[in-house]
Structures are given as structure tokens and as C-alpha cells.
Image (spheres, rainbow, N blue to C red):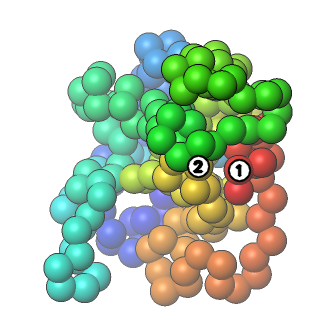
Amino acid sequence: MRRLRLRSVCVVDPGLTDSELDRIERKFGFRFAADHRGFLSAGLPVNTRPQPREPGVIHTHPEPWPDWRNGKRDKLRSLLDWPRKGVLFDVEHNGFWYDGWGSRPSGTASAVATATSMLAQVPKMVPVYGHRYLPGEPRTFGHPVLSIWQTDIIYYGLNLADYIDRKFSRLGPGEGSWEPEASVEFWRDLV
């Protein structure tokens, strides 16, 4: 959080309290990873309209920081569902099938139903910024930040602090020392 404040990239409100974090986790049925929880306890980034890097650039997420304190439930649910829905889109429209699910059913509807059931068993991904996610793995830390766009998943930071440095400084994804290793089942296999 200190890195965000030093770079003046957004307003930072007071951090979420333990009771606020617990309420969010209960309401949405996931747990923040320890470093994600610590980050949000230190301060809550507030959305400000991003400045285009190039003329004509359209931002996919005009409000990239999840508003865990005052956000609308449906919007937060949509952010939490984004990774799962993207995989299901690729199952339905692009013929994607994960080897760990066994043989793909012959019909599209059956494949989507099976994939939906299987995805209910994988670790939940929790939004950090736009379509950048950390796994919802309680009492763990140091997971790489993943950029998730359907089944196109790439590393965007070695961990949360590294991601903040890369996103809000001149060091881009893959530059500098770069040997991330995804740590949670299913999602690591799609990187």
C-alpha cells in the first residue's frame, strides 16, 4: 500500500478492518490470501478514472479496484465470477477442455454442465485490479498475480508487491528478475 501512496496513482482510503474483511469473506464465500488481506488492511485503493496511455485507448475496466467497502453486491459478485465465466465461455464457444476433467462430453450443453460442476471445486480467484487476480487461499501468501482473460492466463507479478511495482512503475510484466510459479491447482495449469 505504501508503494501506491508513494506513486500517487490513486486515492487510498483507510484500510478495511478485520470485521469488514470477515464480513466480505462470509458474504461472498471466499477467503483472502494473507498478503491480500494485509494489503487491504493497510489501505483501500479507491477508483479514479485511469488516464489513457495512448490516444484512443479504451479501458476494459474503468473502475479497476474492487470497492470492497461500498461496492454493489452484484458488481463484486461479477468480478468474483469473472474467471469461472471466462473458462465456461471457452468451453462453450472455443472447444476448451481441461485434461483433468476426463473426457469431454459430446454435447456442448453437457460439456458446460460438467465444466460448471468441476469449476465449483477449484480454488476461487479474488480480484486485485481489473482482471488481475490472486487465489483465495487463506493463511497463505506470496502467490503470483495472474491476469485472467477466459483461459488466456499469464503472470503479471511474482507476488502482490511485485505486481504493484510492475503495474504502477516503468517495469512491465516479464521484465527484470522473472521466475513466477503459479501455486494453486487448476489455474496454474492454464498459465
Counting from the top left corner in percent of width and height, residue 42 is at: 49, 46
Please indicate, yes or no, whether residue 156 appears anywhere in the rendered image: yes
Q: Is residue 178 above or below residue 155?
A: below
Counting from the top left corner in percent of width and height, residue 67 is at: 32, 38
Q: Amino acid at mark 2?
A: Thr
Quarter of the image holding residue 146? bottom right
Residue located at (81% from left, 59% from top): 181
How would you rate the neighbour count of disc 2 (Cα within 10 Å): few for under 14, some for 14-19, many for 20 or more? Answer: many
Residue located at (59% from left, 18% from top): 110
Residue located at (77% from left, 64% from top): 180
Q: Amino acid at mark 1?
A: Leu
Q: Nearer the viewer, residue 161 or 6?
A: 161
Counting from the top left corner in percent of width and height, residue 173 is at: 59, 75
Q: Is residue 36 left or right of residue 7?
A: right
Counting from the top left corner in percent of width and height, residue 5 is at: 39, 66
Quarter of the image holding residue 171? bottom right
Residue located at (61% from left, 30% from top): 124
Q: Is residue 5 left or right of residue 71?
A: right
Specify which label sits upstream in the sequence, 2 or 1: 2
Circle 1 residue: 190
Q: Is residue 40 left or right of residue 103?
A: left
Please indicate, yes or no, whether residue 45 appears anywhere in the rendered image: no
Q: Give the mark count.
A: 2
Q: Is residue 184 above or below residue 19?
A: below
In whole angstroms, how far apart are the C-alphas of marks 2 and 1? 7 Å
Q: Nearer the viewer, residue 42 or 84?
A: 84
Q: Are marks 2 and 1 in contact (CB under 8 Å)?
A: yes
Circle 2 residue: 151
- Find numbered disc 1 in the image and state the secondary structure of the residue it sits on: helix
